[in-house]
Amino acid sequence: MIADKGFLHTFGVRALVVAHKKKRSRCTETERTDPHVVFPLCTFGCDYLYEQCHVTVCDGAVVAGNPAAGSTEAGAVAALVGRVVDPRWTGAPTAYFDNVNLGGRGRVPDKEAVTTE
């Protein structure tokens, strides 16, 4: 479930995939066995946008990552930015989200630096 300004979106199990917050190849053995290193993402776009570095999670909310190449992706990013992630999936070490999907090109952007145009 994703909270969105008071609304909850509920997806069927088949519409979800288990995604790694931190790339599995970068995890230590302890992190690989930590059940909090994964979280569910929908196949309607969240998984793609996260894997392609367009969105990430900072302080429990979705923030923009790398710029999207197309207007459709940019629109999907804009629709997600600011949404609160269910606290069940953000209770792990914040380092799991640090630099995970920005391709090693920097830290997760500060909330103040993110625009949602």
Image (tube, rainbow, N blue to C red):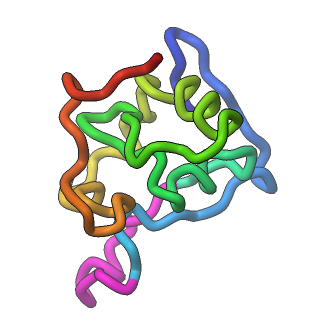
- In the rendered image, residue 26 lying in the magenta stretch gets the answer yes
**Is residue 1 among what the camera can see?**
no
Locate residue 98, reporting x and y percent. 23, 57
- In the rendered image, residue 99 lying in the magenta stretch gets the answer no
- Left or right, 32 with respect to 44, comes to left
Residue in view at x 51 percent, y 53 percent: 50
Locate residue 76, reporting x and y percent. 63, 33
Closest to the observer, 36 or 94: 94
- Left or right, 13 with respect to 59, comes to right
Count the marks: how many? 0
The segment highlighted magenta reads 25-39
Closest to the observer, 6 or 61: 61
Q: Quadrant of residue 16?
A: bottom right
Residue in view at x 58 percent, y 47 percent: 69
Instruction: From this view, report whether residue 77 is shown above or below residue 112.
Output: below
Q: Quadrant of residue 2?
A: top right
Residue in view at x 66 percent, y 61 percent: 17
Residue in view at x 37 percent, y 34 percent: 63
Locate residue 37, reporting x and y percent. 36, 66
Closest to the observer, 63 or 4: 63
Instruction: From this view, report whether residue 91 is shown above or below residue 14.
Output: above
**Is residue 82 among what the camera can see?**
yes
Locate residue 47, reporting x and y percent. 60, 54
Q: Quadrant of residue 84?
A: top left
- Left or right, 40 with respect to 97, comes to right
Q: Main secondary structure of the magenta part?
A: helix
